[in-house]
């Protein structure tokens, strides 16, 4: 005590920050060398530790006012007022973020200097397959002791490395019981699973889980039974406990709602996988496959006779052998985590993309594993060549069966038996209406998160050569896409010719705010209330400038004889590409403007020869915004153009146009039509021309095309339900099955047209597998962009009904599925983390598999926005099960919902 007091006095008076730092460093290094199992480490709040680190590393030591106050661990615990021996830390703490672990010697020294608390000691335990790895048990088991028949309870913390004998001892101490009159039960899920009699067995080896119940049963001594003395033997006690358990079950049900005795964990399945370094993506996928009952049974039996040693498409059986060996380890008794190094070595050999220790996509690994295992276990040794036939009007059932028989003739394995289904693919040529129907196999369904992966954008397209009226198009583009995606969609919708391209601009206050010429501009920079216009311009013409035609009209407060003042911007600008190599006169500009405006000229104005063509652009599309009216307007425009062409040339009067020169002076283009204009310098890409609209001219044109340029996206009234309803898995499936045109990069060769066509494609589910794997496409990839969607998808756990989505209507019975496993992805793409949620069907209980850590979870916690790959099993019943009866799992075929 004298030494401690001296240290405390010296630290406050004479120890400098540098001396504290050196002393603690020396103590820590010495403690690290001597660290062993059973040592004690102490939690200290990261906030206080960082304060002390900053203090001892300061450049100017004469700042004692910054010295930390006493250690305050209150932010790590639930109840700061609790006694130190009963304090409990928060369940979601992370090392390095919330706390730091200090060796006992370091803690003692810091605590002697600064005091404070509470003290949070934790033991070092052995872990790993060889039990040679050391780890600090930050979260000891938290168990609830339930006393029977008195119905008392108590919660304790105990290390998973403690023995059953120590648990028995502590239970007797807590409830003040005579040890020889007490037995304890593994009471997981409020069921008596096993009588815990092996006093030397650790709680970890006994498969005791965090937050589970332990039944503490006081044995009856009635009817001249066992004496209450401590001399009674344990073996006699065990016999008594087992015999009395048969008669006390009914009483137990009344006290704690139990349902009798079962054998939990007898078949294994609660073994974790060590993280070898960013291998959580592999661990999560493997656990889901390992806990697929059909695979678990298959690989625990003798599957070697089915290995295809000669298949050049496979891995000569090596992948199947490595997976089978790993599966058997994970289903072996005990719960020591397995290090999957041999399997990863084989994986890296056959799939180099998964070598090293970088993070990868678990779905990509899953796809490789399913395909690789199939080829290694393919029962077909020599694949026959079979040429697929087109449907040619035959019944779908006949064609589908033919395709499936052809597929099975080349592909026949446990993977096909369990995981492969069939969908109907229909392609329709947009030119000749040729219909092609095929029936293709699938291993999993990749469903888009439709409501968040795309957005609709409305843009008005202008053709400024006088050939057509403007039209408005609403197109669907990737939400995280770029301008090139929008331009491509608009080009397809507006039938841009090979010799044309679209120039996209943003309009603000009736002026061009910015040119969106960079194809890599993110669409996220364009807001829904922005206004966009696109102009068709020549594609291959070099050395050009853009003529911007800005419309103006009279301010209502100005008189008609005002020319240079009182004019306000109006409508949407027009834009025309003009060559710089040719001489351009003022008259040429007037003719160009007249040509641009000609589709909007009212028909009755054509009978007059005193029309003044004015520079106005077609800035808006049809007000109704639908393509039907746009087509009608185009027809009107074409008929007007034909009428103008066939009649006598219209005599144009001088146009009220003003050119803005480089000094920002306005030049009246109606004076001196033969004079050549001076084009702006190379630094400017546009020629600005104002067109001033008088009321007389407004009456001679359909000027509504200049007005009301639509917003990129117009929000309509949204119901409360639509605002609050989450994205449904059914909605994602419907988006996957929806008919849509092929992307330009994936054009279909029409056998009738003998050309590649952008056909429409429609998918339908035809044959469903026993295990349906569904991939939610959370990751978006492109050449320059990677993005993760954090959308919450509401997916059913029970009764996933696909009956109405099956095109094969003669397939009788309900198509019902139950969720039994899923992988989760947390965080962003580069540094995220994968886990798995898996239901052990024999226990009817969900577990979280987080690498080597396994813990029970409630069914309500299965759903989250992290869900990535879902595993469903067909609900087998007399009226819904079709096919592969020999693959059904033992026991009750229908999964019962956990209450």
Image (cartoon, rainbow, N blue to C red):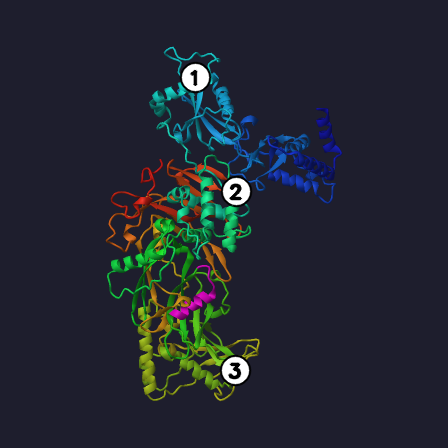
Q: Is residue 585 above or below residue 560?
A: below
Pick whichever, 461 or 206, lies toward us: 206
Q: Would residue 624 be found to the left or right of residue 333 on screen?
A: left
Image quarter for residue 253? top left
User: Residue 713: within the magenta?
Assistant: no
Q: Which residues are magenta?
A: 479-492
**In the rendered structure, are the residues bearing label 2 and label 3 in contact, judged by CB atoms less than 8 Å apart?**
no
**Who comes first in sequence, dot 2 or dot 3?**
2
**Who comes first in sequence, dot 1 or dot 2?**
1
Q: Main secondary structure of the magenta part?
A: helix
The residue labelled by disc 1 is 236
Q: Is residue 267 above or below residue 684?
A: above
x and y percentages locating residue 112 in the rendered image:
68, 30
x and y percentages locating residue 580 in the rendered image:
52, 82
Kind of element beneath mark 2: loop
Pick whichever, 573 or 480, lies toward us: 480
Please give the label number shown on residue 580: 3
The residue labelled by disc 2 is 339
Image quarter for residue 10? top right
x and y percentages locating residue 565 in the rendered image:
49, 75
């Amino acid at each position: 005590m004298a030494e401690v007091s001296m240290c405390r006095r010296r630290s406050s008076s004479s120890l400098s920050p540098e001396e504290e730092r050196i002393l603690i460093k020396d103590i820590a290094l010495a403690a690290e060398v001597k660290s062993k199992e059973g040592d004690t480490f102490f939690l200290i709040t990261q906030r206080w530790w960082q304060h002390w680190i900053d203090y001892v590393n300061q450049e100017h030591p004469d700042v004692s006012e910054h010295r930390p106050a006493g250690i305050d661990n209150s932010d790590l615990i639930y109840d700061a007022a609790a006694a130190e021996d009963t304090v409990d830390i928060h369940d979601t703490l992370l090392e390095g973020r919330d706390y730091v672990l200090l060796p006992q010697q370091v803690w003692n020294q810091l605590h002697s200097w600064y005091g404070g608390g509470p003290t949070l000691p934790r033991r070092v335990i052995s872990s790993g397959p060889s039990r040679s790895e050391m780890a600090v048990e930050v979260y000891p088991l938290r168990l609830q002791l339930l006393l029977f028949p008195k119905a008392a309870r108590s919660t304790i913390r105990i290390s998973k490395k403690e023995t059953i004998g120590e648990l028995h001892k502590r239970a007797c101490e807590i409830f003040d019981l005579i040890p020889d009159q007490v037995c304890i039960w593994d009471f997981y899920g409020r069921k008596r699973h096993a009588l815990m009699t092996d006093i030397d067995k650790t709680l970890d080896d006994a498969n005791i889980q965090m937050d589970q119940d332990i039944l503490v049963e006081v044995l009856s001594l009635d009817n001249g039974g066992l004496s209450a003395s401590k001399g009674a033997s344990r073996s006699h006690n065990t016999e008594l406990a087992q015999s009395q358990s048969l008669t006390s079950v009914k009483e137990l049900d009344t006290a704690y709602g139990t349902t009798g005795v079962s054998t939990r964990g007898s078949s294994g399945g609660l073994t974790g996988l060590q993280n070898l370094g960013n291998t959580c993506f592999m661990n999560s996928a493997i656990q889901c496959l390992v806990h697929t009952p059909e695979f678990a049974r298959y690989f625990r039996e003798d599957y070697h006779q089915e290995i295809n040693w000669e298949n050049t498409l496979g891995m000569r059986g090596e992948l199947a052998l490595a997976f089978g060996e790993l599966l058997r380890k994970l289903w072996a008794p005990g719960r020591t985590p397995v290090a999957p190094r041999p399997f990863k070595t084989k994986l890296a050999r056959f799939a180099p993309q998964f070598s090293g220790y970088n993070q990868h996509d678990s779905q990509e690994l899953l796809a490789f594993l399913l395909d690789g295992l199939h080829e290694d276990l393919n029962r077909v040794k020599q694949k026959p060549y079979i040429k697929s036939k087109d449907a040619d009007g035959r019944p779908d059932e006949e064609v589908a069966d033919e395709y499936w028989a052809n597929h099975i003739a080349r592909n026949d394995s446990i993977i096909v038996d369990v995981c492969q289904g069939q969908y109907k693919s229909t392609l329709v040529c947009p030119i000749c209406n040729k219909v092609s129907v095929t029936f293709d196999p699938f291993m999993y369904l990749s469903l888009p998160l439709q409501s968040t992966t795309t957005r609709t954008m409305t843009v008005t397209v202008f053709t400024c050569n006088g050939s057509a009226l403007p039209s408005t198009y609403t197109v669907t583009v990737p939400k995280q896409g770029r301008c090139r995606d929008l331009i491509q969609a608009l080009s397809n919708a507006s039938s841009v010719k090979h010799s044309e391209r679209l120039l996209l601009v943003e309009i603000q206050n009736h002026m061009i705010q910015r040119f969106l010429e960079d194809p890599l501009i993110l669409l996220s920079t364009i807001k829904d209330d922005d206004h966009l216009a696109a102009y068709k311009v020549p594609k291959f013409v070099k050395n050009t400038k853009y003529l911007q035609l800005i419309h103006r009209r009279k301010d209502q407060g100005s008189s008609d004889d005002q020319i240079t003042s009182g004019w306000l911007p109006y409508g949407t600008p027009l834009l025309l590409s003009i060559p710089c190599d040719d001489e351009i006169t003022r008259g040429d500009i007037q003719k160009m403007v007249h040509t641009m405006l000609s589709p909007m000229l009212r028909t009755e104005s054509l009978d007059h020869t005193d029309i003044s063509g004015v520079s106005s652009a077609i800035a808006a599309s049809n007000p109704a915004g639908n393509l039907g009216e746009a087509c009608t307007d185009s027809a009107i425009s074409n008929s007007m153009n034909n009428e103008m062409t066939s009649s006598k040339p219209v005599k144009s009067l001088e146009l009220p146009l003003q050119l803005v020169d480089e000094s920002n002076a306005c030049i009246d283009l109606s004076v001196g039509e033969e004079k050549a204009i001076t084009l702006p310098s190379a630094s400017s890409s546009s020629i600005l021309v104002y067109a001033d609209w008088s009321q007389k001219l407004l009456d001679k044109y359909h000027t509504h095309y200049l007005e009301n340029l639509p917003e990129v996206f117009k929000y309509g009234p949204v119901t409360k339900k639509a605002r609050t309803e989450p994205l449904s898995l059914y909605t994602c499936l419907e988006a996957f099955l929806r008919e849509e045109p092929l992307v330009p990069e994936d054009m279909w060769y029409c056998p009738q047209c003998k050309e590649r066509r952008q056909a429409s494609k429609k998918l339908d589910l035809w044959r469903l597998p026993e295990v349906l794997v569904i991939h939610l496409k959370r990751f978006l990839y492109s050449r320059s962009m990677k993005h993760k969607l954090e959308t919450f998808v509401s997916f059913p756990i029970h009764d996933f009904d696909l009956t109405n989505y099956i095109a094969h209507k003669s397939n009788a019975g309900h198509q019902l599925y139950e969720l039994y496993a899923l992988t989760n992805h947390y965080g962003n793409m580069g540094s995220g983390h994968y886990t798995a949620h898996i239901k052990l069907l024999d226990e009817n209980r969900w577990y979280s598999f987080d690498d080597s850590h396994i813990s029970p979870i409630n069914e309500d916690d299965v759903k989250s926005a992290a869900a990535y790959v879902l595993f469903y099993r067909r609900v087998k019943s007399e009226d819904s099960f079709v096919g592969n009866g020999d693959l059904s799992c033992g026991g009750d075929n229908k999964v019962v919902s956990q209450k």
